[in-house]
Image (spheres, helix red, strand yellow):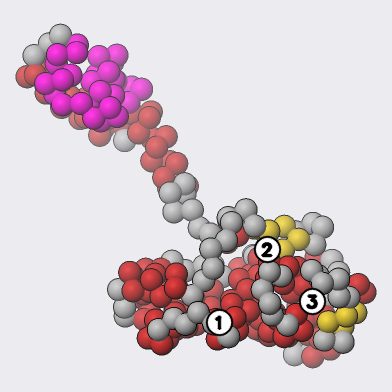
Amino acid sequence: MGNGKVEICGVNTSKLPVLSAKEKQELFEKIKQGDMEARQRFIYGNLRLVLSILKRFSNRNENIDDLFQIGCIGLIKAVENFDTSHNVQFSTYAVPMIIGEIRRYLRDNNAIRVSRSIRDTAYKALSVKERLVGENGKEPGIAEIAKELDLPPEEVSIALDAIVDPVSMQEPLYHDGTDAVFIMDQIKDEKNIDETWLESISLREAINRLNEREQHIINLRFFQGKTQMEVASEIGISQAQVSRLEKNALNHMRKNL
């Protein structure tokens, strides 16, 4: 840790074990059957995950023992709610829950006061978020959280923004030598999803099937944003001809799509 302390809350951090993927799977099978000893071993074998996350909070003047205990609560919650059927690594699932638990603790002890109503909204939103992660195995969007709370998405977004600190997208959250989890790994890319790529490819193929003049007009009109008059002036034909060629090109593209 930042202060060079090896023992935290009576735990010698230099001797903490690292569980293999096979060991994690075997222990979790036993945990699902109610084996409390396996549960304890699994939690103890993932304490390095909590320690790794604590590094990002090292710039705060907080008692490291307190933060470690709070992080362990998040770890225990993750163990209790983790669903292996979602085909997600435990570390990927547990990191946001541990961070969330620590952030809640820091917010409650923050000298900068946020209004009670905003904090209440944020806490409810985080609670809904954790529940949805547990149910679906993935991070819900603001709109989904807002729907559950019956609130405008803008209000939920403002509340959540008011209680979090800005961080780098490239900031590592966890690394155990094989598993590296970054903040950007926890964020869904709404733009570059498979459906968007497929639509883009289909559109490009439809354009490529047009003749050279039609391709040129479509490019000028819809990719360069020019008016029909500007297109007509550039290629030396009338606006009526541009309009006719444009309509024909769009009809051909619709058939190809």
Start and end of the magenta stretch? 207-235
The amino acid sitting under disc 1 is Asn
Above or below, 242 relative to 50: above
- Local packing at callout 3 (Cα closer than 10 Å; few below 14, some 14-19, many 20+) is some
Counting from the top left corner in percent of width and height, residue 193 is at 47, 49
- Tell me if label 2 and label 1 are in contact, CB under 8 Å: no
Above or below, 102 relative to 52: below
Q: At 20% from the left edge and 30% from the top edge, which residue is drawn?
A: 251
Magenta stretch, overall SS: helix
Q: Quadrant of the C terminus?
A: top left
* N-terminal label among 3 and 1: 3
Q: Which residue is mark 2?
A: 173
Q: In the image, is 161 to the left or to the right of 52?
A: left
Q: Quadrant of the N terminus?
A: bottom right
Please tell me whether mark 3 sits on a helix, a strand or a loop. Answer: helix
- Local packing at callout 2 (Cα closer than 10 Å; few below 14, some 14-19, many 20+) is many
> Toward the viewer: 61 or 79?
61
The amino acid sitting under disc 3 is Leu
Q: At 71% from the left edge and 70% from the top edge, which residue is drawn?
A: 58
Give how far apart the Cα atoms at labels 3 and 2 are. 14 Å
The mark found on residue 47 in the picture is 3
Counting from the top left corner in percent of width and height, residue 25 is at 78, 71
Please tell me whether mark 1 sits on a helix, a strand or a loop. Answer: loop
Above or below, 119 relative to 166: below
